[in-house]
């Protein structure tokens, strides 16, 4: 089984015995509250948080003209701290243009291909992570507030079914870990609620930034299930359900995680 | 959930060993500890010198004393397929290929542990008195 987090912090954590049925949570709880004080400090430090390198790179890309239109994001959207503040809490959202739910990554690529005349950026590329982190960071401190009407409601129900479906050779659902065992430990690692308010996150285990869909794939692989492709509709639906679960949690991008 | 497998102890067992070769407790300990094999300690604590205290999981009950609580046949059922006893258990079925959804193709059609590994593991668990 290859789901032992390689950098699980063994030091100082005493396993509480056999607390299997964690009570269902009423208030969502950020992954931040499950971190060691050292990692919390790293996230809070505006100079040391490694995720800010991607945010800074995103700020540069925001101003950089691209594609056959030779236009930058800023040419259309102006000052991101104004135009992009409040966007991340509403995403994924229904795109009339595409006729489906899109996440922030998808909307950025839609602007690139339809409006800049540029190639869409591949998932997990430095540029897409940077722009996504930059756009999300404009909403830092704002509560997630996903409205679930129309196509979003259907997407949410598909995502809910995904979340409770047991899968893989280990036969575990997302809920088995992130609802039933919150606060319990896999080896020495505490299990959080699996909320998405910090994404893209800088994850020590990855030694880099990763998207929400990379995390979904990691958790799928942990139970030896075949992951879905990043950007796939299955993961967008799951992201909708996940964001709905996170409603009320404030955006922390760029979060630092184990 | 903790009691689910214990409560019906005795009700279900697989009395017959899966292989002709008797289980080897030393190899079974490696199966339990190794994260590419049983990886039991991701969910269970057990008091053995190989384990730094606090480095094991607490999803399932401690395995200390499990060799006194459960018989060889009961242990075999719980490792091979605990769903027979508790359909909703979180404990994985280590020697089954049935009833799974979307298994990674690298593992599809194969059990997590082969028959001899299961027997070795049981021999180890029986030493936990």
Image (cartoon, coloured by chain):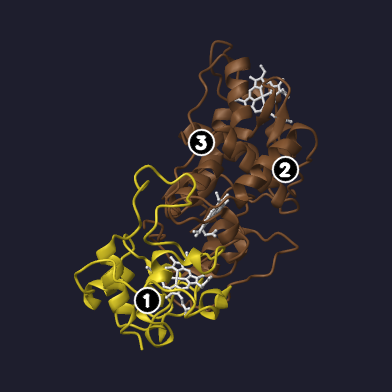
Please state the horizontal and vertical placement of residue A175, each as a whole percent of the image: 60, 57
* Residue A210 or residue A178, whichever sits in front: A178
- Residue B68, by quadrant, is bottom left
Distance from disc 3 to disc 1, alpha carbons, whole Å, reads 44 Å
Q: State the image coordinates of residue A228 (x, y, percent, origin top left).
A: 49, 38
Q: Which mark is residue B73?
A: 1
Where is residue A199 drawn, in percent x and y?
Answer: 58, 46
Residue bearing mark 3: A230
Labels 3 & 1 near each other (Cβ < 8 A):
no
Q: Residue at x 58, y 62 (%)?
A: A192
Q: Nearer the viewer, residue A182 or A74?
A: A182
Figure chain in yellow: B
Tell me the subunit letter for badge 2. A
Residue B32 appears in the figure:
yes
Task: Nearest to the eye among marks 3 and 2: give it.
Answer: 3
In the visual, does A161 lie left or right of A54?
right
Q: Chain of mark 3?
A: A
Q: Residue furthest top?
A: A68
Q: Few, some or many C-alpha atoms within 10 Å of disc 1 (few <14, some 14-19, many ≥20)?
A: some
Q: Badge 2 is on which residue?
A: A89
Which numbered disc, 3 or 1, marks the residue closer to the eye?
A: 1
The hue of chain A in the figure is: brown
């Amino acid at each position: 089984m290859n789901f032992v987090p390689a950098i699980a912090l063994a030091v100082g954590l005493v396993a509480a015995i056999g607390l299997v049925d964690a009570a269902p949570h009423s208030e969502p709880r950020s992954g931040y509250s499950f971190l060691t004080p050292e990692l919390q400090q790293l996230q809070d430090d505006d100079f040391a948080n490694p995720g800010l390198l991607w945010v800074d790179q995103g700020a540069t890309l925001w101003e950089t003209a691209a594609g056959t239109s030779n236009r930058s994001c800023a040419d259309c959207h102006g000052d991101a701290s104004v135009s992009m503040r409040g966007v991340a809490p509403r995403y994924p959202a229904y795109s009339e243009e595409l006729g489906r739910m899109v996440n922030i990554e998808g909307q950025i690529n839609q602007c690139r291909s339809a409006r800049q005349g540029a190639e869409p950026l591949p998932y997990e590329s430095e540029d897409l992570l940077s722009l996504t982190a930059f756009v999300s960071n404009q909403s830092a401190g704002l509560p997630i507030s996903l409205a679930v009407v129309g196509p979003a409601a259907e997407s949410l129900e598909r995502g809910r079914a995904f979340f409770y479906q047991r899968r893989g050779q280990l036969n575990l659902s997302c809920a088995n870990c992130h609802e039933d065992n919150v606060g319990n430990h896999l080896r020495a690692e505490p299990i959080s609620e699996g909320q998405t308010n910090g994404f893209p996150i800088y994850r020590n285990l990855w030694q880099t930034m990763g998207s929400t869909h990379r995390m979904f794939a990691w958790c799928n692989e942990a139970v030896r299930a075949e992951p879905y492709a990043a950007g796939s509709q299955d993961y967008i639906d799951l992201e909708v359900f996940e964001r709905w679960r996170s409603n009320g949690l404030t955006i922390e991008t760029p979060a630092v995680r184990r | 959930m903790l009691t689910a497998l214990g409560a019906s102890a005795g009700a279900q067992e697989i009395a017959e060993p899966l292989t002709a070769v008797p289980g080897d407790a030393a190899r079974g300990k490696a199966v339990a500890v190794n994260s590419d094999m049983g990886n039991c300690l991701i969910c269970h604590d057990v008091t053995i010198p190989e384990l730094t205290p606090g480095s094991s999981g607490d999803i399932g009950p401690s395995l200390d004393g499990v060799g006194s609580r459960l018989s060889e046949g009961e242990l075999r059922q719980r490792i091979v397929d605990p769903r027979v006893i508790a359909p909703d258990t979180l404990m994985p079925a280590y020697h089954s290929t049935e009833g799974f959804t979307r298994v990674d193709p690298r593992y599809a059609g194969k059990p997590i542990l082969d028959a001899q590994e299961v027997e070795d593991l049981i021999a180890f668990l029986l030493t936990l008195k």
